[in-house]
Image (cartoon, coloured by chain):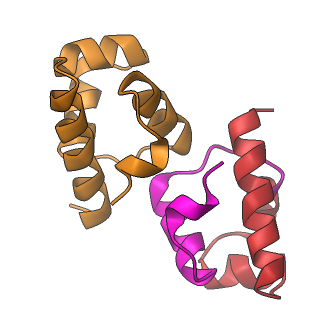
Chain colours: A red, B orange
């Protein structure tokens, strides 16, 4: 698996937990499939900038702050 | 066109010019098609995080610094 994607996924997971929301809730609010959100957090997919911004907006943080 | 992609493309173009390299050279060094690099700079495509990091590495700047 790609180290960049893994590190980004870990950052997203940590920020999501900080926000106290479930993976399902985050997926729903970002209009993403639940299983896809799981793959994002495990670093199994190489997301687009647009998805990064959607996730960051819901996690109330700048998109750049999620970057490794 | 997507404002996010347009703003990102403009940032990449400005940083590329700052580095004094051509769009073709940047595309070649990033292993990207020349016409695709043009579309990135015009904000016509929604690039992945991995491509953002490849471009940032070649432009000698943090990936986050290219984000709008």
Across and down, in percent, residue B29 comes to 38, 12
Q: Is residue A16 left or right of residue A30?
A: right
Residue A30 part of the magenta segment = no
Across and down, in percent, residue B12 comes to 27, 40
Residue in the image at 69% along x and 39% along y: A4
Across and down, in percent, residue B6 comes to 22, 55
Across and down, in percent, residue A36 comes to 74, 60
Residue in the image at 59% along x and 77% along y: A31
Residue A65 part of the magenta segment = yes
Q: Quadrant of the N terminus of chain A?
A: top right
Residue in the image at 33% along x and 11% along y: B28
The answer to whether residue B46 of the structure is visible from this angle is no
The answer to whether residue B28 of the structure is visible from this angle is yes
Q: Is residue A19 left or right of residue B65?
A: right
Residue range of the region highlighted in magenta in the rendering: A41-68
**Image quadrant in which you'd find residue A44:** top right
């Amino acid at each position: 698996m790609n180290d960049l994607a893994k590190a980004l996924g870990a950052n997203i997971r940590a920020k999501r937990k900080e926000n106290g929301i479930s993976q399902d809730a985050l997926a729903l609010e970002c209009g993403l499939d639940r299983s896809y959100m799981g793959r994002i957090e495990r670093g199994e997919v190489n997301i687009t900038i647009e998805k990064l911004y959607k996730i960051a907006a819901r996690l109330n943080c700048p998109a750049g702050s999620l970057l490794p």
